[in-house]
Image (tube, grey):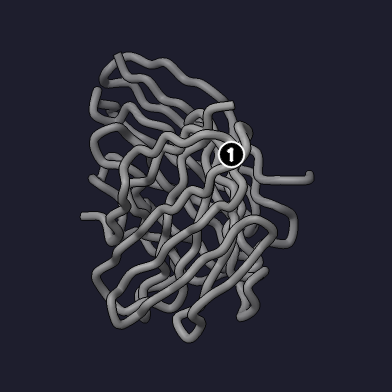
Amino acid sequence: SQQGEEDPQALSIQEGENATMNCSYKTSINNLQWYRQNSGRGLVHLILIRSNEREKHSGRLRVTLDTSKKSSSLLITASRAADTASYFCATVINNAGNMLTFGGGTRLMVKP
Amino acid sequence: GAGVSQSPSNKVTEKGKDVELRCDPISGHTALYWYRQSLGQGLEFLIYFQGNSAPDKSGLPSDRFSAERTGGSVSTLTIQRTQQEDSAVYLCASSPEGRTSYQETQYFGPGTRLLVL
């Protein structure tokens, strides 16, 4: 079964608005990563946050991590039509190797 | 090359046939991963190679699936006696492996879309 659950499963917003996606997971983690996927092709790494970090920024992206609630959020500010994609959170579980365990993903559509 | 490459891009096969999928990781990356993405199961880990260590095969769904990595570089995922439920996108990723954020990031190839008729 998947480690993470993401919500919403789908999100539609207007260009310029902010998009927030949430991810929950079940077990203790080493780090949590967010990936983007366009049209069912390869995944592009966006940002990695470690279990001892609470917030990270990268350009228009902001990621938070709450290990007490086993949850993370990805915020995309000032969205653009080009941000339309599927976004996945993935965790590296403690003492379980370095493979990623993915959530179900959020399909984001940004309307111009 | 600049990134992870996979071949073929698309593969259509008949039920019961064997298929081989290839992955060329980024040069110098010691870790290589195979994942599968299907409509019903989402993104699933299959197998992981790290340097010369024995691979972690814990994600392989059945003994029809196997993978090898020759010379610590190119990897081949083989599916024997394919079934319709094997239809999916097979994604390969590599990483340098280490303790920095950069080294833990996995870099994905474009995937091979497999359709079993």
Q: Residue B88 sits in which quadrant?
A: top left
Who's the residue at 56% across and 63% down the image? Answer: A62
Q: Is residue B22 visible?
A: no
Give residue A107's position: percent from left, percent from top: 41, 37
Against B49, is B93 above or below? above
Q: Nearer the viewer, residue B65 or A62?
A: A62
Q: Is residue B33 visible?
A: yes
Against A84, is B116 above or below? above
Give residue A65's position: percent from left, percent from top: 43, 74
Against A18, is B49 above or below? below
Give residue A21's position: percent from left, percent from top: 41, 53
What is the chain identity of the residue bearing mark 1? A
Who's the residue at 52% across and 52% down the image? Answer: A35
Quadrant, the C terminus of chain B: top left
Q: Nearer the viewer, residue B117 or A68?
A: A68
Q: Residue furthest bottom?
A: A52
Q: Residue furthest right?
A: B1
Q: Residue A38 sits in which quadrant?
A: top right
Against A67, is B69 above or below? above
Give residue B61's position: percent from left, percent from top: 25, 47
Who's the residue at 61% across and 80% down the image? Answer: B99
Q: Is residue B83 left or right of B25 when viewed as pictured?
A: left
Label 1: few (<14), some (14–19) or many (≥20) C-alpha neighbours in 10 Å? some
Residue wearing tag 1: A83
The kind of residue on which mark 1 rests is Asp
